[in-house]
Image (cartoon, grey):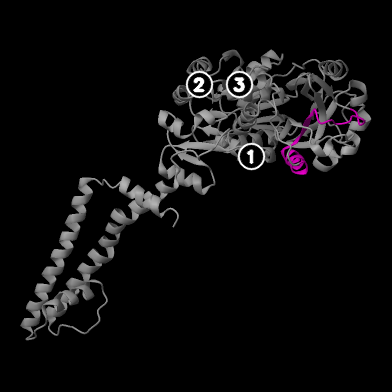
Amino acid sequence: MKFLPATIAEIVRQSQPKQRNIRLLLKFLGALAGMIVLFSVIFHLIMAHEGRAHHLFDGVYWTFTVMTTLGFGDITFHSPLGKLFSVVVMLSGLVFLLMLLPFTFIEFFYAPWMAAQAAARTPRKAPSGIRDHVIFTTYEPITAAVIPRLEHYQRPYIVLVPDHETALRLLELGVHVMLGTPDNPESWQLARIKEAALVIATDADIPNTNAVFTARQESPDTPIAATAKELPSTEILPMAGATSILRLDEMLGNFLARCVEAGSTQAHIVGEFGPLLIAEATASSIGLVGRTVRESGLRENTGLTLIGGWMRGVYHPASPDLLIQQGMMLIVAGSRDQLAGFNRHHGAAPVTSTPVVIVGAGRVGRATARSLGIMGFDYRFVEKVTGRSPDPDRTTLGDAADLQTMHRAGFLKARTVVLTSHEDDANIYLTVFCRRIRPDVQIIARATHERNVTTLHRAGADFVMSYPILAANALCSTLLGGDLLMVAEGVHAFRVKTPSKLHGVRLADSRIHQDTGCLVIGVQDGGATHINPGPDHVFEPTHELILVGSIEAEERFLANYPGARVGARGASVLPTGAATGRP
């Protein structure tokens, strides 16, 4: 009932049906009324033929009871002519009253009522008093991936939708929507863009430019993040007013290249909190492989903190008994000098004897090749479309599901294959194919939809990254001022002010790792940063903690320490998560 006034108002607002519909409705009602009058007249004529007389209204009464198939039987014909007429009236009633009338009611009454009710439920402006919210220009996989993270950090948001049908469908899914289009200045005013914390445009490049330009005209100061697929758009979107550009193809290509096991085991920096660096490296050193973290002496020899490691799609949090296996992707934290020491002791030069096979020469495939080239790796493309590859001399034309094509590309000798197709079904198919032919090969795959990441891991992929996951973490990092950093798939580094429960508590006595699963990898005190603090470090009210852990571990930390909130002030994300996407 709470929507009744709004529904009536919406019906009144939209009560301008087409003249053709009005004519059709009037014709139907006129035909129905004429038919009832005609049948009533014929009723009296046949009754007179049978020698009986009835009241004038009895004809109308009989006609309605027969047309509606009620047939009370109090008035009946005795002659064959009268019975035949009764059948004609009954069939006419079946067509007009039981078939055409319901459709007419639905078309001219029920459907407009439901449409008005749906329109009344769809907000046409942002809630009054809303501030620091996020405005999305469209709803697609990236938006769907970002929303749960915003809800996790208790950030309000609004998704602009252009029509009632889409709005109603999203409302049923629990999405906060507002009726409006990103190219309409009034929509941005009603969305309260001047009070917003961030605008996110994730449509195609041209619609993004229109949306960004329109939004910027309404609010000169609100940060605007936009995705860009084509290189010229990285220059045009800032001219339109975008403050942050995400080239997801480049970012995804960089990530896939960094996962390649066939080359350097040098630690690659993926993010930084001031002097505290977070890096990843492939475990291949004799001093690490086959040993537990305790036996490796990694902390004692280099000063680095091992955060965890990825192996065959499974993340293993760091523990003293964690076994370091060949090819495991290690995630470490420390200073620049400590990383340099790691590279001296455990980093190996790139192994370039066999090329990396890249399936697909699209934008992601080409970005992967560029990153591999910078890192000193050789590579080969497998591509169906002639002329798509930027390097024909390194390209094998054909279907990657054909063993002969893969053989010509060097797959049978390669240590790594990278699947970059935008079709998840094709990548799953090729993952199963490659794993069956080469059980020992490293398979790195791209996923377009987040739901297929787990499927690709089960199919045999060693590392998988999806557009939505990558974009969601980059956008959340932008929103939170850099205080959130995606270390790896499902693993975050984040900064919080020291909770009151930890004031004056030693790290060894805090039980942060035991109770939440998060590791303290740094403590900031003003301009000073204590990297990998020791067990005797005492937390002070002025400190800010830098922690790392899975999404679940982060949730446990925030639940165990009420009042702690991610997003105090900025850490910087390196270019791998920025506009250029270069490693």
Mark 2 or mark 1: which is in front?
2
Question: In which image quadrant can residue 29 be found?
Answer: bottom left
Cα–Cα gap, marks 2 and 1: 26 Å
Res. 512 in view? yes
Location of residue 540 (image quadrant)? top right
Q: Amino acid at mark 2?
A: Pro
Q: Marks 1 and 3, how far apart in space?
A: 30 Å
Whichever of labels 3 and 2 marks the residue nearer the N terminus, that label is 2
Amino acid on which disc 1 is placed: Gln
Q: Is residue 581 left or right of residue 11?
A: right
Q: Circle 3 sits on which residue? A: 250
What numbered label is drawn on residue 220?
2
- Residue tagged by mark 1? 154
Residue 2: percent from the left, percent from the top? 45, 55
Seen at 13% across and 81% down, the residue is 80
Label 1 residue SS: loop
Q: Verify whether residue 540 appears in magenta.
A: yes
Q: Quadrant of the N terminus?
A: bottom left
For marks 3 and 2, give the CA distance.
29 Å
* Residue 76 higher or lower than 214, as above or below: below
Q: Residue 219: image x %, image y %? A: 49, 24
Residue 9 part of the magenta segment = no
302 vs 111: above or below = above
Locate residue 395 relative to residue 489 in the image: left or right.
left
Q: Nearer the viewer, residue 267 or 496?
A: 496
**Magenta range:** 534-561
From the viewer's perspective, is the residue at label 3 or at label 2 nearer? 2
How many residues crowd mark 3 within 10 Å: few (<14), some (14–19), many (20+)?
A: many
